[in-house]
Image: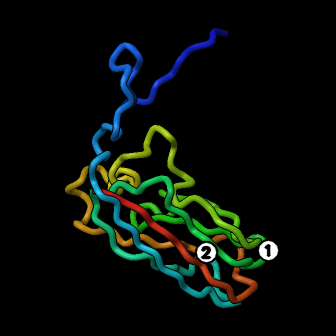
Amino acid sequence: MAVVDIYGNYVATPTQNTTPKAMPTGPYAHKAPNMHFDRCEVTSGDSVGSKLYFGRFPRSAIILPQSKVFFGALGASVTLDIGDANSADGLASDIDVSAAGSGDFLEAVAAENLGKPLWELLGYASEDAAEETLTLYGTLAGAAAGATKSVAFSLIWTS
């Protein structure tokens, strides 16, 4: 094994520039982020397959990794998937919501896919194959909800 210096794709290496940059560079560095926050109630007895609609977002949206989902304790074995009609768990799969806490909105997205447009993360063959806006939702999985609790999310994106 060797000790190496590893730089991000858009970070200047010492040989490129020894002066720190005021702003990062890259394809999305200068675009203002958008944020959508909402909360809904899951009711005790809501069954596996129940959907929590998060809203419609542009197919070209780049969801930032700071996006989160927050939840109360929904009961033993309850999990949450996040995606759309094309891929119900394309963004997150089996988030454990049995105890109160939070999870990453992009839990199922590999690091090399971060920064890709929403249509690509959800498995569409091309941008034209996806509608202009895509409806994102969470789907209860694992078990029916055993408690009435809130599920909230903060979706931060740019395009």
Please name whichever residue, 41 or 7, is drawn nearer the observer in this view of the structure. 7
Q: Residue furthest top?
A: 2
Please name whichever residue, 81 or 1, is drawn nearer the observer in this view of the structure. 1
How many angstroms separate mark 1 from mark 2 (CA)? 12 Å
Quadrant of the image containing the C terminus: bottom left
Please name whichever residue, 115 or 51, is drawn nearer the observer in this view of the structure. 115
Q: Position of residue 70 (x, y in %)?
A: 61, 71
Report which residue position mark 2 lands on: 140
Q: Residues within 10 Å of mark 1 (few under 14, many from 20)?
A: some
Which callout, 1 or 2, points at the residue further toward the start of the chain?
1
Q: How many marks?
A: 2
Residue at x 42% of width, y 67% of height: 84
Asked if marks 1 and 2 touch (Cβ < 8 Å), the reply is no
In the displayed structure, 30 sits above or below 46; it is: above
Taking the image as shown, residue 67 lies to the left or right of residue 18, namely right
Q: Position of residue 66 (x, y in %)?
A: 50, 56
In the displayed structure, 25 sits above or below 80; it is: above
Residue at x 44% of width, y 30% of height: 8
Task: Tell me the number on the disc at residue 76.
Answer: 1
Quadrant of the image containing the N terminus: top right
In the displayed structure, 126 sits above or below 137; it is: above
Taking the image as shown, residue 134 lies to the left or right of residue 102, namely left
The kind of residue on which mark 2 rests is Leu
In the displayed structure, 47 sits above or below 35; it is: below
**Mark 1 element type:** loop
Q: Residue furthest right?
A: 76
Taking the image as shown, residue 62 lies to the left or right of residue 108, namely left
Q: Position of residue 153 (x, y in %)?
A: 52, 72
